[in-house]
Amino acid sequence: MWIRDLVRLIKKKDPAIKSFMEVFLYPCFWAILLYKFGRRLYIARLYFLARFVSEFARFLTGIEIHPNAKLGKDLFIDHGAGVVIGETCEIGDNVLIYQGVTLGGTGKDAGKRHPTIGNNVMIGAGAKVLGPFKVGDNVKIGAGSVVLSEVPPNTTVVGIPARAITREENKHNSPSDCLDQLHFPDPVQMELCRLKATVEKLNARLLKIEKTADKPE
């Protein structure tokens, strides 16, 4: 039964839980439970009732999931406050979402307006993923990042706007399982190191040229 699986998932994902009963205090549990109910109403074309359930879930949990969004298996929303998942958003399996995340659109266009999230993705606290593009499998999105374009699989992205800082590191280690949103390479530090190495190389070449020019003929 999917409710039992959801309870086990939340217990597994959050080390703060000491007993299974605590799971029923988690916003993630109630948000997904009510989403399932609202989703059935939406499919039955009972749109007002579906949205009513969605808004009630937002009031109760702080998590807003549109009933037309498509959620995969083993979605875990940690803490949950301020999470928004838009109408045409699609989320794959084994995805971890921290608080303050928005999976939103960028306008009023009809059709697909929200992102498609792959499998085994971790989205850090406060991150915004905006637009109808794909975020590949095994992607890690740093806290506070703003993602405005497609992200290839097995990539870590950070910044505003977000940019890739590593590739392939997540291929055999699912970001959604490690729960780590702290240990990211610093893109500014990496750029400074690159510039420092370039300056040192140019200085060495300049000294070599100067020594050659100073030699008597």
Image (cartoon, grey):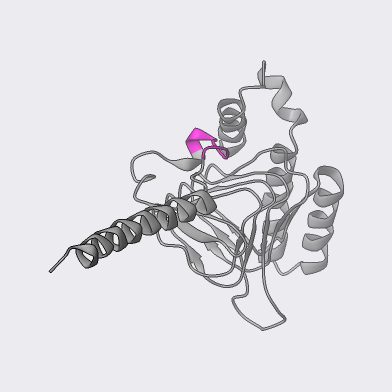
Q: Residue furthest top?
A: 18
Q: Position of residue 92 (x, y in %)?
A: 50, 54
Q: Is residue 184 left or right of residue 4?
A: left
Quadrant including the C terminus: bottom left
Q: Position of residue 70 (x, y in %)?
A: 58, 59
Question: For residue 127, which quarter of the picture?
Answer: bottom right
Reply yes or no: does residue 194 show up in magenta.
no
Residue 118 seen in render: no
Q: Is residue 105 left or right of residue 53?
A: left
Segment tinted magenta in the rendering: 177-183
How many numbered marks does the figure carry? 0
Q: Position of residue 160 (x, y in %)?
A: 62, 62
**Viewer-proximal residue among 141 and 185:** 185
**Viewer-proximal residue among 180 and 174:** 180
Q: Residue furthest left?
A: 217
Q: Residue at x 18, y 63 (%)?
A: 215
Tell me: residue 193, above or below residue 162.
above
Q: Position of residue 102 (x, y in %)?
A: 69, 58
Residue 19 seen in render: yes
Q: Is residue 65 left or right of residue 209?
A: right
